[in-house]
Amino acid sequence: MKDIITRMLWAVLVLSIPPAAHAKLNVFTCEPEWAALLKELAGKNAKIFSATHARQDPHFVQARPSLIAKLRSADLAVCTGAQLEAGWMPMLQRRARNPKVLKGKDGHFEAAWSVRRLEIPGRLDRTEGDVHGDGNPHIQLDPRRMLKVARALSSRLQKIDPGNASSYKKRFQQFSKSWKTSLAKWKKKAGAVKGKRVIVHHREWIYLLDWLGMKRVGSLEPKPGIPPTISHLSDLKKRTADLIIISPLNDKKPSKWLREQTGTPVVVLPHTVGAVPNSKDLFAFFDNIVQQLINKVSK
Ligand SMILES: [Zn+2]
Protein backbone atom coordinates (compact mmCIF):
# COMPACT_ATOMS: atom_id res chain seq x y z
CA MET A 1 0.00 0.00 0.00
CA LYS A 2 2.74 2.40 1.02
CA ASP A 3 4.53 1.52 -2.18
CA ILE A 4 1.49 2.40 -4.28
CA ILE A 5 1.04 5.73 -2.52
CA THR A 6 4.72 6.56 -3.04
CA ARG A 7 4.42 5.71 -6.74
CA MET A 8 1.27 7.82 -7.07
CA LEU A 9 2.99 10.73 -5.35
CA TRP A 10 5.88 10.42 -7.77
CA ALA A 11 3.50 10.35 -10.70
CA VAL A 12 1.77 13.53 -9.46
CA LEU A 13 5.13 15.19 -8.96
CA VAL A 14 6.42 14.25 -12.41
CA LEU A 15 3.21 15.35 -14.12
CA SER A 16 3.25 18.70 -12.36
CA ILE A 17 6.69 19.60 -13.72
CA PRO A 18 6.21 21.59 -16.91
CA PRO A 19 8.02 20.16 -19.94
CA ALA A 20 11.41 21.75 -20.50
CA ALA A 21 10.88 24.83 -22.64
CA HIS A 22 12.45 24.49 -26.08
CA ALA A 23 15.46 26.77 -26.12
CA LYS A 24 14.79 29.84 -28.19
CA LEU A 25 16.98 30.70 -31.12
CA ASN A 26 19.20 33.66 -30.26
CA VAL A 27 19.17 36.04 -33.19
CA PHE A 28 21.41 39.07 -33.58
CA THR A 29 20.22 41.54 -36.23
CA CYS A 30 22.16 44.53 -37.52
CA GLU A 31 19.18 46.76 -38.37
CA PRO A 32 15.59 47.15 -37.11
CA GLU A 33 14.05 46.03 -40.43
CA TRP A 34 15.57 42.56 -40.05
CA ALA A 35 14.46 42.35 -36.43
CA ALA A 36 10.95 43.20 -37.66
CA LEU A 37 11.13 40.58 -40.40
CA LEU A 38 12.30 37.94 -37.93
CA LYS A 39 9.39 38.78 -35.67
CA GLU A 40 7.11 37.88 -38.58
CA LEU A 41 9.01 34.75 -39.55
CA ALA A 42 10.08 33.29 -36.21
CA GLY A 43 7.57 34.62 -33.68
CA LYS A 44 8.12 33.12 -30.26
CA ASN A 45 10.75 30.65 -31.49
CA ALA A 46 13.42 33.33 -31.46
CA LYS A 47 14.84 35.87 -29.08
CA ILE A 48 15.61 38.81 -31.33
CA PHE A 49 18.13 41.56 -30.69
CA SER A 50 18.79 44.57 -32.92
CA ALA A 51 22.29 46.08 -32.82
CA THR A 52 21.00 49.45 -34.01
CA HIS A 53 17.82 51.34 -33.30
CA ALA A 54 15.82 53.32 -35.83
CA ARG A 55 17.53 56.62 -35.04
CA GLN A 56 21.02 55.24 -35.54
CA ASP A 57 22.90 55.38 -38.82
CA PRO A 58 23.73 51.77 -39.75
CA HIS A 59 26.75 52.88 -41.84
CA PHE A 60 28.48 54.11 -38.70
CA VAL A 61 28.18 52.10 -35.50
CA GLN A 62 30.57 51.68 -32.57
CA ALA A 63 31.63 48.10 -31.82
CA ARG A 64 30.60 48.40 -28.16
CA PRO A 65 31.28 45.57 -25.63
CA SER A 66 27.51 45.02 -25.22
CA LEU A 67 27.23 44.32 -28.95
CA ILE A 68 30.20 41.94 -28.82
CA ALA A 69 28.54 40.01 -25.98
CA LYS A 70 25.27 39.77 -27.93
CA LEU A 71 27.03 38.47 -31.03
CA ARG A 72 28.99 35.99 -28.94
CA SER A 73 25.81 34.31 -27.70
CA ALA A 74 23.98 34.39 -31.06
CA ASP A 75 22.88 31.32 -33.04
CA LEU A 76 22.17 33.46 -36.07
CA ALA A 77 23.31 36.93 -37.22
CA VAL A 78 21.14 38.71 -39.79
CA CYS A 79 22.57 41.80 -41.47
CA THR A 80 22.08 43.71 -44.72
CA GLY A 81 25.56 42.98 -46.09
CA ALA A 82 26.84 44.54 -49.33
CA GLN A 83 29.29 46.47 -47.16
CA LEU A 84 26.63 48.44 -45.27
CA GLU A 85 28.14 47.21 -41.99
CA ALA A 86 31.75 47.11 -43.28
CA GLY A 87 32.81 49.69 -40.71
CA TRP A 88 31.76 47.70 -37.65
CA MET A 89 30.68 44.09 -38.22
CA PRO A 90 34.16 42.69 -39.03
CA MET A 91 35.43 44.14 -35.75
CA LEU A 92 32.45 42.68 -33.84
CA GLN A 93 33.03 39.30 -35.50
CA ARG A 94 36.71 39.30 -34.53
CA ARG A 95 36.00 40.16 -30.92
CA ALA A 96 32.94 37.96 -30.43
CA ARG A 97 34.80 34.84 -31.64
CA ASN A 98 31.57 32.98 -32.22
CA PRO A 99 32.21 30.30 -34.87
CA LYS A 100 28.45 29.82 -35.45
CA VAL A 101 27.95 33.26 -36.98
CA LEU A 102 31.11 33.61 -39.05
CA LYS A 103 30.82 34.40 -42.77
CA GLY A 104 30.08 31.24 -44.73
CA LYS A 105 28.39 29.48 -41.80
CA ASP A 106 24.65 28.78 -41.63
CA GLY A 107 24.42 31.18 -38.69
CA HIS A 108 25.47 34.09 -40.89
CA PHE A 109 22.84 35.64 -43.15
CA GLU A 110 23.25 38.72 -45.33
CA ALA A 111 19.97 39.89 -46.85
CA ALA A 112 21.52 41.72 -49.81
CA TRP A 113 22.59 38.47 -51.48
CA SER A 114 18.97 37.27 -51.79
CA VAL A 115 18.06 40.07 -54.20
CA ARG A 116 19.31 41.83 -57.30
CA ARG A 117 21.20 44.90 -56.17
CA LEU A 118 21.30 48.21 -58.00
CA GLU A 119 24.15 50.66 -58.56
CA ILE A 120 26.95 48.12 -58.50
CA PRO A 121 30.03 50.14 -59.43
CA GLY A 122 32.34 48.94 -62.18
CA ARG A 123 35.40 47.02 -61.06
CA LEU A 124 37.73 50.00 -61.29
CA ASP A 125 35.10 52.65 -60.72
CA ARG A 126 35.05 53.79 -57.11
CA THR A 127 33.59 57.18 -57.94
CA GLU A 128 30.18 56.23 -56.55
CA GLY A 129 31.44 56.90 -53.03
CA ASP A 130 33.04 54.90 -50.30
CA VAL A 131 30.02 53.55 -48.47
CA HIS A 132 28.39 51.73 -51.41
CA GLY A 133 31.32 49.83 -52.85
CA ASP A 134 29.32 46.60 -53.31
CA GLY A 135 26.27 48.20 -54.88
CA ASN A 136 23.47 50.00 -53.09
CA PRO A 137 22.77 48.08 -49.86
CA HIS A 138 19.48 49.75 -48.85
CA ILE A 139 17.28 46.94 -50.16
CA GLN A 140 14.75 47.11 -47.30
CA LEU A 141 12.99 49.95 -49.10
CA ASP A 142 11.49 47.72 -51.79
CA PRO A 143 8.73 45.41 -50.50
CA ARG A 144 9.19 43.05 -53.48
CA ARG A 145 12.79 42.52 -52.45
CA MET A 146 11.69 42.21 -48.82
CA LEU A 147 9.60 39.19 -49.79
CA LYS A 148 12.60 37.56 -51.48
CA VAL A 149 14.68 38.11 -48.37
CA ALA A 150 11.84 36.67 -46.26
CA ARG A 151 11.80 33.48 -48.32
CA ALA A 152 15.58 33.00 -48.03
CA LEU A 153 15.61 33.85 -44.33
CA SER A 154 12.78 31.45 -43.57
CA SER A 155 14.69 28.63 -45.31
CA ARG A 156 17.71 29.47 -43.20
CA LEU A 157 15.66 29.36 -39.99
CA GLN A 158 14.29 25.95 -40.99
CA LYS A 159 17.84 24.73 -41.60
CA ILE A 160 19.42 25.88 -38.35
CA ASP A 161 16.43 25.08 -36.13
CA PRO A 162 14.94 21.93 -37.71
CA GLY A 163 12.86 21.16 -34.62
CA ASN A 164 10.68 24.17 -35.44
CA ALA A 165 10.87 23.90 -39.23
CA SER A 166 7.14 23.35 -39.72
CA SER A 167 6.34 26.41 -37.63
CA TYR A 168 8.73 28.58 -39.70
CA LYS A 169 7.27 27.21 -42.90
CA LYS A 170 3.73 27.99 -41.81
CA ARG A 171 4.67 31.47 -40.65
CA PHE A 172 6.34 32.24 -43.97
CA GLN A 173 3.27 31.10 -45.89
CA GLN A 174 1.06 33.37 -43.79
CA PHE A 175 3.47 36.28 -44.11
CA SER A 176 3.82 35.81 -47.86
CA LYS A 177 0.06 35.80 -48.34
CA SER A 178 -0.56 38.97 -46.33
CA TRP A 179 2.48 40.66 -47.87
CA LYS A 180 1.32 40.00 -51.44
CA THR A 181 -2.10 41.45 -50.61
CA SER A 182 -0.46 44.54 -49.12
CA LEU A 183 1.95 44.86 -52.04
CA ALA A 184 -0.93 45.10 -54.50
CA LYS A 185 -2.72 47.60 -52.26
CA TRP A 186 0.38 49.82 -51.88
CA LYS A 187 1.20 49.77 -55.57
CA LYS A 188 -2.35 50.74 -56.51
CA LYS A 189 -2.53 53.48 -53.92
CA ALA A 190 0.85 54.91 -54.97
CA GLY A 191 -0.11 55.07 -58.64
CA ALA A 192 -0.09 58.88 -58.56
CA VAL A 193 3.63 59.06 -57.71
CA LYS A 194 4.73 57.17 -60.81
CA GLY A 195 7.06 59.22 -62.98
CA LYS A 196 7.65 61.86 -60.31
CA ARG A 197 11.16 63.34 -60.21
CA VAL A 198 12.90 63.10 -56.87
CA ILE A 199 15.94 64.59 -55.19
CA VAL A 200 17.09 62.42 -52.29
CA HIS A 201 19.44 63.24 -49.43
CA HIS A 202 21.36 59.94 -49.20
CA ARG A 203 20.98 57.39 -51.98
CA GLU A 204 19.04 54.95 -49.83
CA TRP A 205 15.78 55.45 -51.73
CA ILE A 206 16.76 53.91 -55.06
CA TYR A 207 14.89 50.65 -54.34
CA LEU A 208 11.73 52.50 -53.33
CA LEU A 209 11.93 54.61 -56.50
CA ASP A 210 12.58 51.51 -58.58
CA TRP A 211 9.46 49.85 -57.15
CA LEU A 212 7.15 52.83 -57.61
CA GLY A 213 8.52 54.03 -60.95
CA MET A 214 9.83 57.33 -59.63
CA LYS A 215 12.94 58.95 -61.03
CA ARG A 216 15.93 60.23 -59.09
CA VAL A 217 17.25 63.46 -60.57
CA GLY A 218 19.82 64.22 -57.89
CA SER A 219 21.17 63.61 -54.40
CA LEU A 220 21.89 66.25 -51.76
CA GLU A 221 25.03 64.28 -50.89
CA PRO A 222 27.50 64.74 -53.78
CA LYS A 223 28.57 61.11 -53.18
CA PRO A 224 27.14 58.55 -50.74
CA GLY A 225 28.36 59.42 -47.26
CA ILE A 226 29.77 62.83 -48.29
CA PRO A 227 27.86 65.80 -46.77
CA PRO A 228 26.21 68.30 -49.14
CA THR A 229 28.33 71.26 -50.25
CA ILE A 230 27.20 74.74 -51.29
CA SER A 231 28.41 74.32 -54.88
CA HIS A 232 26.64 70.96 -55.20
CA LEU A 233 23.39 72.38 -53.82
CA SER A 234 23.58 75.33 -56.20
CA ASP A 235 23.86 72.86 -59.06
CA LEU A 236 20.80 70.92 -57.79
CA LYS A 237 18.84 74.18 -57.75
CA LYS A 238 18.88 74.14 -61.57
CA ARG A 239 17.24 70.71 -61.79
CA THR A 240 13.48 70.31 -61.92
CA ALA A 241 12.09 68.01 -59.23
CA ASP A 242 8.67 67.24 -57.76
CA LEU A 243 9.83 66.08 -54.36
CA ILE A 244 12.80 65.98 -51.98
CA ILE A 245 13.05 62.79 -49.88
CA ILE A 246 15.07 62.67 -46.68
CA SER A 247 15.16 60.32 -43.67
CA PRO A 248 14.90 61.38 -40.01
CA LEU A 249 18.67 60.76 -39.70
CA ASN A 250 19.61 63.41 -42.25
CA ASP A 251 20.65 66.97 -41.51
CA LYS A 252 17.52 68.99 -42.34
CA LYS A 253 19.35 72.16 -43.42
CA PRO A 254 20.31 71.21 -47.00
CA SER A 255 16.77 70.07 -47.94
CA LYS A 256 15.26 73.11 -46.25
CA TRP A 257 17.59 75.39 -48.21
CA LEU A 258 16.67 73.73 -51.49
CA ARG A 259 12.96 73.89 -50.67
CA GLU A 260 13.25 77.63 -49.94
CA GLN A 261 15.14 78.19 -53.19
CA THR A 262 12.93 76.11 -55.47
CA GLY A 263 9.62 75.52 -53.69
CA THR A 264 10.04 71.74 -54.05
CA PRO A 265 8.34 70.03 -51.07
CA VAL A 266 10.32 67.89 -48.63
CA VAL A 267 9.05 64.61 -47.20
CA VAL A 268 10.67 62.81 -44.26
CA LEU A 269 10.19 59.08 -44.84
CA PRO A 270 11.16 56.25 -42.48
CA HIS A 271 14.29 54.48 -43.77
CA THR A 272 13.61 51.62 -41.37
CA VAL A 273 10.89 50.20 -39.15
CA GLY A 274 10.16 52.57 -36.28
CA ALA A 275 12.06 55.58 -37.67
CA VAL A 276 8.93 57.76 -37.57
CA PRO A 277 5.68 57.39 -35.59
CA ASN A 278 3.27 54.84 -37.09
CA SER A 279 5.94 52.63 -38.63
CA LYS A 280 6.29 50.09 -35.86
CA ASP A 281 6.18 46.92 -37.96
CA LEU A 282 6.96 46.04 -41.58
CA PHE A 283 3.39 46.55 -42.76
CA ALA A 284 3.04 49.91 -41.01
CA PHE A 285 6.45 50.92 -42.37
CA PHE A 286 5.31 50.71 -46.01
CA ASP A 287 1.80 51.99 -45.18
CA ASN A 288 3.50 55.08 -43.80
CA ILE A 289 5.84 55.56 -46.78
CA VAL A 290 3.06 55.22 -49.35
CA GLN A 291 0.64 57.45 -47.43
CA GLN A 292 3.21 60.22 -46.96
CA LEU A 293 4.19 60.17 -50.64
CA ILE A 294 0.55 60.38 -51.70
CA ASN A 295 -0.09 63.24 -49.27
CA LYS A 296 2.79 65.21 -50.78
CA VAL A 297 2.06 64.72 -54.45
CA SER A 298 -1.68 65.26 -54.18
CA LYS A 299 -1.25 68.65 -52.50
ZN1 LIG B 1 24.04 54.12 -47.73
Image (tube, grey):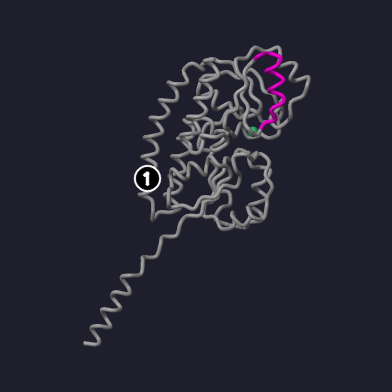
Please tell me whether residue 57 is drawn above or below residue 256 in the rendered image.
Answer: below
Locate residue 22, reporting x and y percent.
41, 60
Dividing the picture into quadrants, the one containing residue 266 is top right
Instruction: Point out the stretch of residues depicted in magenta.
Output: 250-263
- Name, please, the residue furthest toward the left: 1
Q: Position of residue 4 (x, y in %)?
A: 23, 83
Which residue type carries mark 1? Lys
The stretch drawn in magenta includes residue 291: no
The local crowd at label 1, few if under 14, some if 14 to 19, many if 20 or more residues have their Cα within 10 Å, is: some
Side of 207 relative to 220 (left or right): left
Near-viewer residue (122 or 86): 86
**Residue 252 among magenta residues:** yes
Residue at 48% x, 38% y is: 281
The mark total stands at 1
* Residue 208 x, y percent position in the rendering: 54, 26
Quadrant that contains the C terminus = top right
**In the visual, does 174 lie left or right of 129?**
left
Pointer 1: what residue? 169
Beta carbon at label 1 within 8 Å of ligand 1: no
The residue at 57%/32% (across/down) is 270
